[in-house]
Amino acid sequence: MDRSAASAYVYAKASGMLAKSFVGTRAEKLFSVKSLHELYGLLFDDEVPAVPENMLAKVIEIKAQNRFINQYISLLENYSKPDEVLITLLRSYDCENLKEIGAALCYRENVMPELADIGSYSRIAYKYWPDLAAMTANSSVSWYNKIPQSFEQQEIDQRLDLQYIAHLWQSAKKVPVSERQIILSFVQKEIIYQNIIWALRLKVFYKYDAERIAGMLAYEKNTPTEGLGRCGGKTDLFAHDALAILEKEPDLWESWYDWKYANFLNPHEDGVIWEIDPCWVENMMRREMSRQALRAFHKFPDTTMVLFSWFKIKQNELGYIRSVAEGLRLNVDADEVLIAAGATLSSAN
């Protein structure tokens, strides 16, 4: 199928899939279920498996993830030569799989953890488990060839994330010129948001100082190696917004109320102790990217952005499913699940 015919077919097929998905106003159905059995029945057509209740949440998460990946691959394979950026998206699961493998090997687990299967698109030879060097040989992450120590895991996971971001940006630049700017704009914003989330988490949860955080961000052109003052990153396309918040006091509302992204902040009440909540900000940014993806899906039919945005929309749906499943498993109040997934029911739209 040539590119034009494939794009038209993919748009029609993907539209039909989205119509049945729990996105937009349909997301409310996910958050209204009262039990894991009800959630399973809402998501899948087969009978609820006969497993203990505390295991059903994991079954739902794995089944939903596998369906998402398989649907994406089925759409991707309509292109005789899909754009590299669409394959790079799928390979984000190689990155996440390696994090799981590294953690399992670090703690001397004998069984391979549950991994996302992206089939022939993977560049990791999982069949060689538990030989990490053999699994990553001849891949872009061949440097990851030794079992990490516990104190190394965060640094290695960060390196995997940064490498994936670099690949995503470079592959986005290879999209046909007529469509390139649409993809680049979306990816740029996503990386900016990711940098802000990393910076906030490192600042609030780990109490890292500004210079250390600056050395752990994604940069378009250069990674600082000589300290924040000399890295030249304050004008970097990806890092400038994250660098701008490193000196802000996390528990001082006056430092944040006029922030460029103040609409993503957790609520503040006069007279009530407040501290910026990285998880809240992350949920708000994720929600915003999902909204933009949904608009782009319909605005740019018959382009690479259709499948790119479909991936992002469905990935966000998967996040909602996981939040609901975990909330039900732990018997968490429904309002708390909503907050964890994106603040309010209307925020799912």
Image: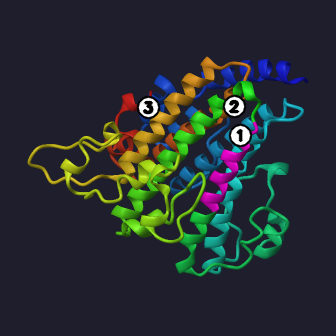
Q: Nearer the viewer, mark 2 or mark 3?
A: 2
The residues bearing labels 1 and 3 have C-alpha atoms spaced at a distance of 31 Å
* Residue 275 picture quarter: bottom left
User: Looking at the image, is 179 positioned above or below residue 67?
Assistant: above
Give the residue type that dot 3 points to. Ala
Badge 1, how many Cα within 10 Å: few under 14, some, many 20+?
some
Picture coordinates of residue 157, whole percent (x, y): 59, 66
Residue with the mark numbered 2: 180
Q: Which mark is residue 173?
A: 1
Q: Residue at x 46, y 34 (%)?
A: 288
> What kind of element bears circle 2?
helix
Residue at left offset 76%, top offset 39%: 174
Residue type indicated by callout 1: Lys
Start and end of the magenta stretch?
Answer: 160-174
Is tag 1's residue or tag 3's residue first in the polypeptide sequence?
1
Residue 325 in view: no
| Lower position in the chain sequence, tag 1 or tag 2 | 1
In the rendered image, the vertical position of residue 301 relative to residue 308, given as above or below: above
Classify the position of the C terminus by image quarter: top left
Label 1 element class: loop
- Answer whether labels 1 and 2 touch (C-beta < 8 Å): yes
